[in-house]
Amino acid sequence: MAVHPTAVVEDGARLGAGVDIGPFCIVGRDVSLGDGVRLHAHAVVSGKTTIGANTVIYPHAVIGGEAQIYNNNAPDARLEIGSGNVFREGVTISLGSAKGHNLTKIGNNNFLMAGSHIGHDCIVGNNVILANGVVIGGHFEIGDGVIMGGLAAAQQFGRVGRYAFISGLSGISTDVIPYGMAIGLHVRLGGLNIIGLRRRNIPRANIHALRAAYRAIFVEGKGSIQANARAAEAAGTWRGVPEVEEVLAFILADAKRPITPARRKRDEDESED
């Protein structure tokens, strides 16, 4: 374990084996750092925060800051972070809040680029990539393997399903289905994240089934997205295809935000002007 003499590690902080704390870092009394965690210069970890092994935190990141809510009083608020994460310069992650479930939770092997932010009470899965300047509002859920382009912004209480791709400069005010590719200033589905599906070695037959289900629900269906999904579920055409069943369950879940619709021809024409 190495702690630079200019760092401040408050009494009560728990440090695992091989922890490396650089110059001018601050580690709060309720913080627990797992084995091999590394804090570069000027990193701050505070609050009731637990960080898993081999996570690396770069300069000027603030991990475990109080939730950004007026009149917040949350003595039990926590932040739980898994192992193998990388938080680049200026990343901020808030504790949970009393208005939520008092917990912000981050999984394993995530890569948050410079200036990105995860708000209070968010749940983030594993292997997520947030590019520079991505901001996530409170109470938001991000599934495994999601990639979000630079300066994308997500409104609170929303969801992005597993292995979805969000383009840069996008505003997310609706729920993006698993495996979806969302693009535009106010996101619309431009199709499926086929590259991501292939990288995960999803069988070709499953990809074809997912494409057919996407067309039936978002392009050719005559009812609402939910009605089309219920019809697809009732028909059972794609029963036993895990990826399709996951999308249907996501659409039909009890959620606070509507589902992101597919792009219309007018959207495409406007983007070309």
Image (tube, helix red, strand yellow):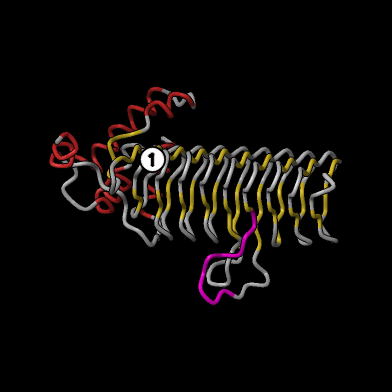
Q: Tell me what residue is drawn at x 69 percent, y 62 percent.
A: 47
Residue 33 at x, y percent in the picture: 77, 49
Residue 86 appears in view:
yes
Q: Tell me what residue is drawn at x 79 percent, y 50 percent.
A: 7
* Membership of 64 in magenta stretch: yes
- Around disc 1, counting alpha carbons within 10 Å, would you say few (fewer than 14), some (14 to 19), or many (20 or more)? many
Q: Nearer the viewer, residue 248 or 237?
A: 248
Screen quadrant of the N terminus: top right
Q: Tell me what residue is drawn at x 41 percent, y 56 percent.
A: 158
Q: Tell me what residue is drawn at x 43 percent, y 60 percent.
A: 156
Q: Nearer the viewer, residue 267 or 5?
A: 5
Residue 239 appears in view:
no
Relative vertical location of residue 258 with respect to residue 72 in this rendering, above or below: above
Residue 13 at x, y percent in the picture: 81, 57
Which residue bears the numbered disc 1?
166
Residue 30 at x, y percent in the picture: 76, 61
Q: Main secondary structure of the magenta part?
A: loop
The magenta stretch is 63-72
Screen quadrant of the C terminus: top left
Residue 182 at x, y percent in the picture: 33, 41
> On the picture, is 4 further left or further right than 153?
right
Three-letter amino acid code at the position of disc 1: Ile
* Membership of 199 in magenta stretch: no
User: Element type at marker 1?
Assistant: strand
**Picture quadrant where residue 96 is located:** bottom right
> On the picture, is 141 further left or further right than 152?
right
